[in-house]
Every structure is written in C-alpha cells, then in structure tokens.
Image (cartoon, helix red, strand yellow):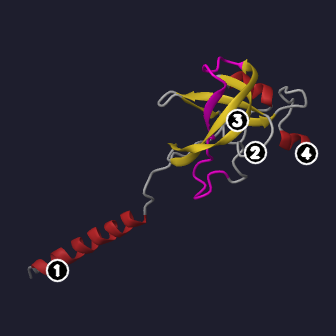
Amino acid sequence: MASSYRSRIAPAAASVLAVVGLVGCAPSEAQTCVDWVDFASPEHALADAELAVTGEVLEAAGATDLYGAQATVWSVRVTGEPLAGEPPPGDEIRVISTPVTCTGEEIYPGGDPLDTAGPLILLLTSDEADGDWRTITPRQGAVPAGPDGELPLAWPEDEEA
C-alpha cells in the first residue's frame, strides 16, 4: 500500500518545527568559553603583560563586546611610571575589564575588579581590533597597589589564606 502524501509530510514538518523550536531556545549571541591562565603571583602576571601601570579608576565609560559578553570599559588615570610597556600619550587610558565567560548572565561573579576605589596595578594586554587595553585575565588583571604603590608579592586572596 502506498503511503499518502500527508503521512510522508507530517513527520518532516514535525522535524522542522522541532528544530525551529530549538533554535528559539538558543542564546542570541554565541559566547566564547575561555580557559584562563592562573598566574602564581603578580610578578608572573607582570612578565606576561604588554602594559602594566598604576592607576585610579575614574568611571565606567561604556561597554563593549568581548568574547560574546558585554564587558565594562573603564576610564583610568595613569599615575606614576609604567611597570611594563609603554602607555599611550596622555594620563588617561580606556581599559576593558575582561569578563569571565560561560557563566550565564553574571560576567563578573565576584564583582568587577575595576569597580573599586584606591590605586590599582593594572596588568594589561592590547585589544588590537579597537586599540583599547584589557585586563590579561578576569581575576588577575588588576591588583591593589602596595602601600608605596609597588606590585604586591602575592595575590590578595592568597594572603588571606
């Protein structure tokens, strides 16, 4: 017995609807999942940074797409001499706070490390696409400056342990 036109089309239509339904559940933008390096100390991170400066965060200056997440861009006043690299002319730079990826809606689970008062040492790499600087990792791209503005010997969380 030959199958009817409807009996052949119904399963195909159901398959298409199922795929369309799944597409509707997909996130609107793909996010790149990054496995970040874990530096043993700020000194190790400094060796990997293209630019390291002491600075004071002035204000949030917008957001940009980084690895498929909306990362905060900060305006930072550079204070003192660079620890590594050569900062651009002027005393202010734009710094993207690198987000943690693939954690759902929360891109800064412990809070944005640049959303703080007090001097920070920023360990940066360049984002050649738009010329902005970004922290080398989400967790170890900014560290509070030591009492005399120096690079601390250990990460703050290591000193607490």
Q: Residue at x 22, y 71 (%)?
A: 12
**Which residue appears farthest toward the left when viewing the image?**
2
Distance CA(mark 3)–CA(mark 1): 60 Å
Tag 2 and tag 4, C-beta contact below 8 Å: no
Q: Secondary structure at mark 4?
A: helix
Q: Secondary structure at mark 2?
A: loop
- Residue marked by disc 3: 141
Pick the quarter of the image with the C terminus. Answer: top right
Q: Seen in the image, is 54 located left or right of residue 94?
A: right
Tag 2 and tag 1, C-beta contact below 8 Å: no
Distance CA(mark 1)–CA(mark 4): 68 Å
Q: Is residue 3 visible?
A: no
Answer with the quarter of the image where residue 39 lies. top right
Secondary structure of the magenta portion, mostly? Answer: loop
- Residue marked by disc 1: 7
Q: Seen in the image, is 58 located left or right of residue 147?
A: left
Q: Considering only vertical position in the picture, is 98 above or below 107?
A: above
State which tag comes first along the sequence, 4 or 3: 3
Between disc 2 and disc 4, the foreground one is: 2
For badge 1, the amino acid type reads: Ser
Q: Position of residue 120 (x, y in %)?
A: 77, 34
For badge 2, the amino acid type reads: Thr
State which tag comes first along the sequence, 3 or 1: 1
Q: Between 5 and 155, which is closer to the camera in this rendering?
A: 155
Q: Secondary structure at mark 3?
A: loop
Q: Position of residue 94 (x, y in %)?
A: 60, 33
Q: Which mark is residue 148?
A: none
Q: Seen in the image, is 82 located left or right of residue 105?
A: right
For badge 3, the amino acid type reads: Gly
